[in-house]
Amino acid sequence: MNKPAKAVYHVLIADDSEADRSLMKIALRQASCLQVIAEVSDGTDVITYLRGQAEFSDRQKFPLPDLLLLDLKMPVLDGFEVLEWLNKQPCPGLTVVVLTDSMQAEHIKRALDLGADLFQVKPRANHDRAAMILALEDYVLRASTATPRHASFRPTQSFA
């Protein structure tokens, strides 16, 4: 049995480029179910947000995201370090999409090995960005309503 779809899926944008964050927010307006809840500019702020610490402690104002758009090349902690941290956290229902300028095969493999759900090169044209957002919306909707085939097992879980 499939779960019902939510009306709104919360999006956290993590990118050190203010221009890229602005372009993503514009493209996200095309999606009917995706809503930007916050944007951060480095990996430390991603973790602070997800932990609900500092200025992000009010979960009414800063709810947990359903979708994290994660740049790889950020100051302080990069996207790979955020993915490593996420591997050790219970984050049920969080879809992580790496958005980057890198097409290096080792970056793609490493990001996916660290648990990213999708790896996407940042589109430069507005119509490509909008198409990507609509495809991500469809992916999130399908992923959130699908019946899991297995119990929520994470590779980092231990059974004592």
Image (tube, rainbow, N blue to C red):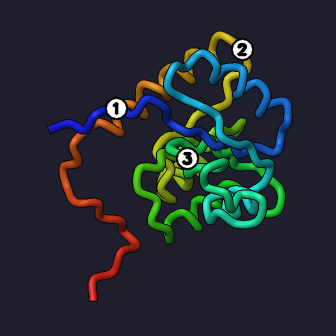
Hey, which residue is sitting farthest top in the picture? 127
**Image location (x, y in percent) of residue 27:** 66, 20
State how far apart marks 3 and 1 are (Cα).
Answer: 15 Å
Q: Secondary structure at mark 2?
A: loop
Circles 2, 3 touching at the beta carbon (< 8 Å): no
Badge 3 is on which residue?
Answer: 65
Q: Secondary structure at mark 1?
A: loop
- Please tell me how crowded label 1 is: few (under 14), some (14-19), or many (20+) other residues with Cα within 10 Å: some
Badge 2 is on which residue?
Answer: 125
Q: Quadrant of residue 154?
A: bottom left
The residue depicted at 48 percent of the width and 22 percent of the height is 135
Q: Nearer the viewer, mark 2 or mark 3?
A: 3
Amino acid marked by disc 1: Ala
Frontmost residue, 104 versus 16: 16
Frontmost residue, 96 versus 62: 62
State how far apart marks 2 and 1 are (Cα).
Answer: 30 Å
- Please tell me how crowded label 2 is: few (under 14), some (14-19), or many (20+) other residues with Cα within 10 Å: few
For the N terminus, the image quarter is: top left
Return the mark for residue 5: 1
- Please tell me how crowded label 3 is: few (under 14), some (14-19), or many (20+) other residues with Cα within 10 Å: many
The numbered mark, 2 or 1, whose residue comes first in the sequence reads 1
The numbered mark, 3 or 1, whose residue comes first in the sequence reads 1
The residue depicted at 29 percent of the width and 64 percent of the height is 153
**Image location (x, y in percent) of residue 7:** 43, 29
Q: Secondary structure at mark 3?
A: loop
For the C terminus, the image quarter is: bottom left
Amino acid marked by disc 3: Pro
In the picture, measured across the screen, residue 116 lies left or right of residue 147, that is right
Q: Quadrant of residue 157?
A: bottom left
In the picture, measured across the screen, residue 19 lies left or right of residue 159, that is right
Residue 105 to residue 25: above or below = below
**Image location (x, y in percent) of residue 64:** 55, 51
